[in-house]
Amino acid sequence: MPQAALETRFASAARSPEGELDRQYEIITSQQIPQLLDAVPISVMVLNVNRQVVFGNKMFLKAVGASHVRDMIGKRPGEAFGCVHSDLTPGGCGTTEFCVECGAVRSVLKGLRGEWNVMECNINRDACPDGGAESLDLRVCSAPYTVMGETFVVFSITDISHEKRRRILERIFFHDILNTLGGIKGILEFVKDEAPEHMREDAELIYGAMVSLSEEIVSQKQLLAAESNELDVNVIDLTAMDILEVLQRTFRNTEEAKERRLMIDPAAQQTAFRSDYALLKRVMGNMVKNALEGTPPGGTVTMGATVAGDEITFTVHNPGFIPRKVQLHLFNRSFSTKGAGRGLGTYSMKLLAERYLDGEVRFETSEEAGTTFFVRLPLAGPQMPAIPTPTPA
């Protein structure tokens, strides 16, 4: 059937003849491109203007179960990967009604228009190398590339199926456990209020422990959302003194504050500003907790707030000193001086304040003056542009 007669529901059905494909393969392999792409640990293809493979790296060949790249020359990505929709029409991959919503096809078409882009797609595959069917969640990237005056697209694929599954399981876990804890908290609140006088103190301690546990779980949920660029920011009107007083009430009776004083600097400015209350409380709370842990018994942690221009800066000071070797790793994920399983506090401070609150976190430390952590924020609230994420199919 002539190419002109091939119908399509989306992208062009036209294909390059075998001689043209061989010529394009020679163009690519005459450069250093094969060596470079073979060094990349993900599947990468070079596609021509008709979306056909003219070269694929070793990881691509492994993914599709091919022994030599020439076995894949002329195929389109969906055909190479065994997409269940790729043979529904004579035009093949990109020409069915399903392809209209396919992130891979849309990404390649953008690449052919000269747009570097990253998108996500799902492919149902019936010809995987190990046999059987499988559903893959993929992150694809298309980058326009010109060599010897000819246009190509470097198309890469990363399997993110495990990430998707993990996120779904995390959402289910947090939803279920927070619902359960919410019920227990309600019961304990009733018990606390109705308990006999001689049991009231114990009931309040149990209730407080349950509230702390709930807050820790919410904090972990928040951190995971922040790392995956899925965290929502709720900007409201706040005052500096309200934040400082809440922190003082929250931490003054904790284990970390035992035999230590937590005070608000009398010079702290009572200033109105806009930010996300929950995120700022998390950032400041980690600062206060770390400061209390770094303060010897009998010592004092001081919180403050100052305004300069259109910015507000919160401070948390303690008399301890941070050794230089600790300073160098302080904001790294999972670095901690407190043992395995710790180290998210300072990391989350910087992540939340700088990525979501348009702020800056830093510290100063010396043996003479102690340690002060600073978080600078705009008075008007975060104005950062939306964090780019892959476009779903």
Image: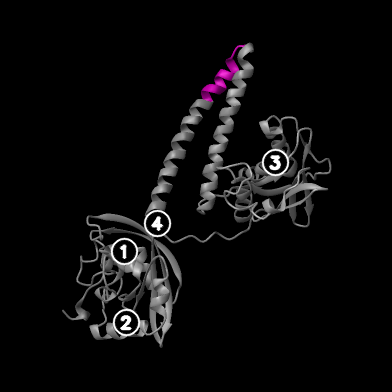
Q: Residues within 10 Å of mark 3 (few under 14, many from 20)?
A: many
- Label located before the other in sequence (3 or 4): 4
Determine which residue is flagged by label 4: 160
Quick check: is 190 in the magenta stretch? Answer: yes
- Label located before the other in sequence (4 or 1): 1
Question: Which SS does the magenta portion mostly show?
Answer: helix
Determine which residue is flagged by label 2: 25
Q: Is residue 9 visible?
A: no
Q: Name the secondary structure under disc 3.
A: helix
Residue occupying image coordinates x 42% and y 81%: 32
- Give the spatial CA distance, label 4 vs label 2: 29 Å
Counting from the top left corner in percent of width and height, residue 314 is at 74, 48
Quarter of image, res 58 = bottom left
Q: Amino acid at mark 2?
A: Tyr
- Give the spatial CA distance, label 3 vs label 2: 61 Å
Q: Amino acid at mark 4?
A: Ile
Q: Residues within 10 Å of mark 2 (few under 14, many from 20)?
A: many
Quarter of image, res 141 = bottom left
Q: Is residue 8 visible?
A: yes
Q: Nearer the viewer, mark 4 or mark 1?
A: 1
Q: Which mark is residue 288?
A: 3
